[in-house]
Image (tube, rainbow, N blue to C red):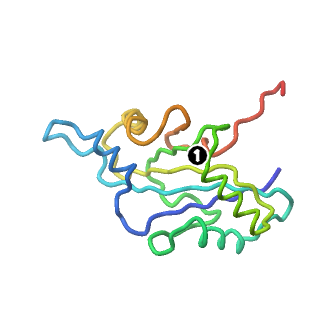
Amino acid sequence: MPRRYRIEIVRRFDAETEELAGLRKLLVSSDAGAPAPFAEGRASRIFVLEDVSPGGATDADLRDLAATLLCDTVREDFTVNEPPASSDPYVLVARKWGVNDPVLNCLQEQIAVRQLALRAVSRGTRLSFPELVASPAEVLRALFRSSANPVVDQAAWNSEAPLSPPRPHPGA
């Protein structure tokens, strides 16, 4: 089984992303006394890569790829093969399997240019909520009304399952 690598890109500053601002707007109640749906949120981008041959990449290769291609090093930090940056409740949004992803296509082209024995497997956006007042179902509904497309995106609550390829059918 090929070795998997996880790169997470996190904004250094607490500026709210478009995804979080859109969610907040949809979840805010018209009742002036209602609490905000979440006190603050944090968005990170996750990329999953895997070896195409044993020993396909070193940690230095992955750090260089993250620092020079995936991360805006002025505004963002990155981790390679570390646990998620936050243990807060979260939703993860990723493309459905089989849907073309232009970002992954560009990443794969850059991996080839750098002659790394890697394959870009998936990417997703992780939205974390330290103090969530809204229910997970409300957040997921609002997410698909604001920034996620139900035709091409999938989402999971407190799970990174959308980043893993589906298991092959037993009869395949």
Residue 34 image position (x, y, % from top left): 18, 40
Q: Which amino acid type is shown beneath numbered disc 1?
A: Glu
- Locate residue 16 relative to residue 47 in the image: left or right: left
**Nearer-the-camera pick, 99 or 1:** 99
Q: In the orientation shown, which residue stands out farthest toward the top?
A: 171
As rendered, which of 86 and 23 lies closer to the eye?
23
Q: Is residue 145 above or below residue 43?
A: above
Question: What residue sits 50% from the left and 32% below the top?
Answer: 150
Q: Is residue 159 left or right of residue 122?
A: left
Up-down relation of residue 47 to residue 31 (above or below): below
Is residue 136 or residue 25 the one in the foreground?
A: 25
Q: Give coordinates of residue 112: x percent, y percent.
A: 76, 62
For image coordinates 49% across by 57% down, the residue present is 44
Q: Which residue is mark 1?
A: 160
Disc 1 element: loop
Label 1 environment density (alpha carbons within 10 Å; few <14, some 14–19, many ≥20): some
The residue positioned 77% from the left and 33% from the top of the image is: 168
Q: Give the quadrant of the C terminus.
A: top right
Image location of residue 151, percent across then percent down: 53, 31
